Amino acid sequence: MRVLHLDTGLSLRGGQHQLLALLGAMGPDASLLAPARSPTLKQALALGFDARPISAAAILARSRDAALVHCHDARSHTLAALFSRAPFVVSRRVAFPVKRGLLSRWKYARAARFLAVSHAVFCRLLRAGIPEAKIDIVPDGVALPPRPSTRTGPILALYSGDPLKGGDLLRRTHLDVHFTSDLPALLPEARLFLHISESEGLGSAALLALAHGVPVVASSVGGLPEIVIPGHTGLLVRNHPADILAAARRILDDETLASSMAANARALVERRFTIERMLRLTLDSYSKVVPRVVK
């Protein structure tokens, strides 16, 4: 079954990394339309995927040959509602309230199904009036590294220009935090990962840290409590510098606790957040729209 994926993001963030993982897992039956100069399109082409620039004309033409269209962000959802000639599903990765204007209600009614990245996002969609029968929970999947972090390196946080991502709060803790846009390069030695945010669908960066066996201190918002389990894989905090500092110090100063969290974190990812499980749940969702999907 041919599936056409749509994404309009202009940066390579968590959702785009999940899209690329899905393309790789689906193989030649998947194709992508994304902005011409986007890092997502460039990465997809470098990996040998069937990927082309997105436009209304491209969606019209390519969706005629697809059994299903999969939208990965809000703007591609709008474009599919306007131009897709195949049924479409929508990944919802953010925990923001769904807008209730006329256009929003129209485009949400057009989608065949919604793939919510977490239970928190599932509840947001329910509150927006989306029927429960049209929503599937499909969490992110990450590859489990062969070895856990040595936990001899820095305290990490993801670099982001997004004011909702808590960079200013982290600086006010006076912890020696290393902000990075390349988590895979530094997580193999990271001691601790700090994920502070005003809103989060699930937290793909936190999930990647857990896969490396790095304990996480995270905001108690959105879907983060579904992966950062207090005392088990990390600690949850209010968005306040003193709370963040206290939680970080508790883990850094207790090697027994940190080691236990590291082991539990990897076990959680292996059990519930693999790319293989993400693919299976995605195909299960597709099959409710196009029953003959090959699994």
Image: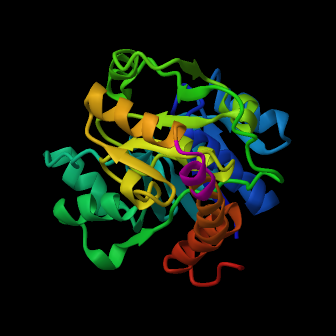
Residue 74 against residue 120 in the figure, above or below: above
Q: Nearer the viewer, residue 182 or 88?
A: 182
Q: How many marks?
A: 0
Q: Nearer the viewer, residue 229 or 3?
A: 229
Please identify the quadrant where the N terminus is shown: bottom right
Horizontal side of residue 164 vs 19, given as left or right: left
Residue 231 against residue 286 in the figure, above or below: above
Residue 238 against residue 5 in the figure, above or below: above
Magenta span contains residue 54: no
- Magenta part of the chain: 254-260
Name the spot of residue 165 as percent of width and height, x first. Answer: 38, 28
Q: Residue at the far bottom: name it.
A: 291
For the question of whether residue 94 can be seen, the reply is no
Q: Residue at the far left: name it.
A: 101
Horizontal side of residue 229 vs 130, given as left or right: right
- Residue beneath the point at 74% across and 56% down: 144
Magenta span contains residue 258: yes
Q: Nearer the viewer, residue 31 or 225?
A: 225
Q: In terms of image quadrants, where is residue 57?
A: top right
Name the spot of residue 235 as percent of width and height, x first. Answer: 41, 49
Q: In terms of image quadrants, where is residue 105?
A: bottom left
Name the spot of residue 221 as percent of width and height, x first. Answer: 30, 47
- Residue beneath the point at 57% across and 37% down: 192
For the question of whether residue 282 can be seen, the reply is yes
Name the spot of residue 227 as percent of width and height, x first. Answer: 47, 58
Horizontal side of residue 239 vs 45, given as left or right: left
Q: Nearer the viewer, residue 288 or 172?
A: 172
Q: Main secondary structure of the magenta part?
A: helix
Please identify the quadrant where the C terminus is shown: bottom right
Horizontal side of residue 288 vs 77, given as left or right: right
